[in-house]
Amino acid sequence: MKVFALTLAFIFVSTATLFSQQEESEKHDQQVFDSLFQKVLIYYHSGQIDSMPHINRQLLELAQKLDADSDRFHAYNAISNYFYAESDFGKSLNYMQKAADNAEKGYRERLSMVYGNIGIHYGALDNVQLSLHYLRKAQQYANLDKRGDGRISADSHLAVLYCKLNEPDSALKYIELAERLNRGTRIEHDFSQANILMAYGQVYEYLKEPELVNYYYRKGLRFCDSLNLKLAHLNILRVYSRYLFDHGQNGASKRYAILAYADGKTMGSKKAIIEATDLLYHLYERQQQEDSAFFYLRANHLYQDSLLQQQKIGQLQLIIVNQQIKETEQSAKAVEDAEQRRHNIQYAAMAFGLIFLTTIFLLLSRTIIVNTRLIEIVGVIGLLIVFEFIYLVLHPFLSDVTHGSPLLMLLILVLVAAVVVPLHHRLEGWITHKLVEKNKAIRLAAAKRTIEKLEAEGE
């Protein structure tokens, strides 16, 4: 009996250890993923765009390995951010849609954020109606947004959108709401605050409040400088330099436009460069400085051509990238399937070991009488486990040899069964015979002890 108890204890400890190791591995991978995602966010906000692709690839590989909708959402979101910063809105929108698909499946608390981001994309593409549609859709899912930054982002960009629709009063309402909400959250607070300050400036432009316009744009620039939020800083430079140009403040406009041009080149933001060079061209033309005007006009045309070419190449690259993602997913699934098969083999081996040791224990025990019917039941279970074990071990080999043909695999498994089943019957017959003899011996010994006891009492 001790042997049997020790066997059960060994199997239990082995199984617990296996699960524990798997859990520890997943926990470590998740910690690495979370750390990389925070790192890529810092790169994005600080304008270190060139540092993002390497981390994004690691995020995508880990997300496929962890197989969680939340991780895939964050990986696709990070990739989308990179292409957005590069002004490649087609690719960026494609990856943001992938993020939305994963949010719909199993990460619904981020639906508000992802639909807001899609709305922001369409706003950058000057598609006001689609932008409005998705930003309102983001509001519909705001009650699921536990972090709060999705609602804040949607409201602040709705404010800008209502300015474009010439509804500044509605714009002011939404930007004030976004600011109130941002006071109560620490997640993405600084980046949201930078966007809110810029949006305030844009709203007061339409309300024709120049003092407040200058106040909020300058406050936004100081705020971004203090926290190294270079991407938000660049966005404020773009809109503020244009505002100053429209109001005849050529010197200040030129100063901010030159800064926007330099930052745009550093970050690789073609849209920012195109806007800055266009503004500088008109500034120098206004001041009749033809050489400088021609320089920025030429730079503007070069970057516009480059952006057009990038968009054309982007369509081809998008097909390639999608294929790479598909291959990565397939590779991750193959690794996962192999790991699962390895675990199943271990489980089958432990189950077979348990039945084998139980049978040996029953054969060797001198006190337990075993019903042959029980042996038949245990034998059938053992046969099924052995067959499953053989199938798990042979499956990869069979797939390669038969090229995945179900008919050929079935025929081979039938041949295996034709060998295993007769062996099982012979083994079962031998064990049954041994147990019957053992049962007889136990009964005979018990009868002898009873007779000896009666004889002793009679004397």
Image (cartoon, grey):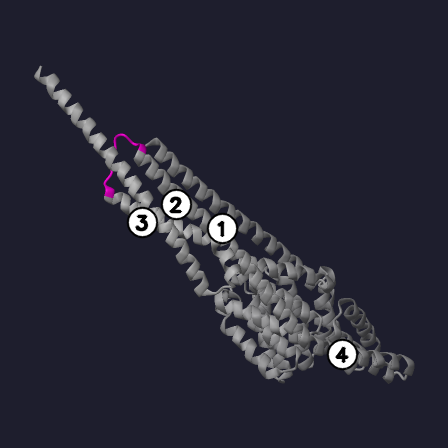
Residue with the mark numbered 3: 380
Is residue 140 toward the left or the right of residue 278 in the image? left
Tag in front: 3 or 2: 3
Q: Are marks 1 and 4 in contact (CB under 8 Å)?
A: no
What are the residue bounds of the magenta stretch? 364-372
Residue with the mark numbered 2: 351
Of the two numbered discs 3 and 2 on the same chain, state the one appearing first in sequence: 2
Q: What element carries label 2?
A: helix
Of the two numbered discs 2 and 4 on the same chain, state the one appearing first in sequence: 4
**Where's residue 194, x and y in %?**
67, 67
Of the two numbered discs 3 and 4 on the same chain, state the one appearing first in sequence: 4
Residue with the mark numbered 4: 242
The residue that appears at 45% across and 63% down in the rendered structure is 408
Looking at the picture, tell me which residue is in the foreground, 308 or 374.
374
Residue with the mark numbered 1: 342
Q: Are marks 1 and 2 in contact (CB under 8 Å)?
A: no
Tag in front: 3 or 4: 3
Quadrant containing the N terminus is top left
Farthest-out residue, left = 458
The residue that appears at 70% across and 77% down in the rendered structure is 311
Amino acid on which the number 4 mark rests in the picture = Arg
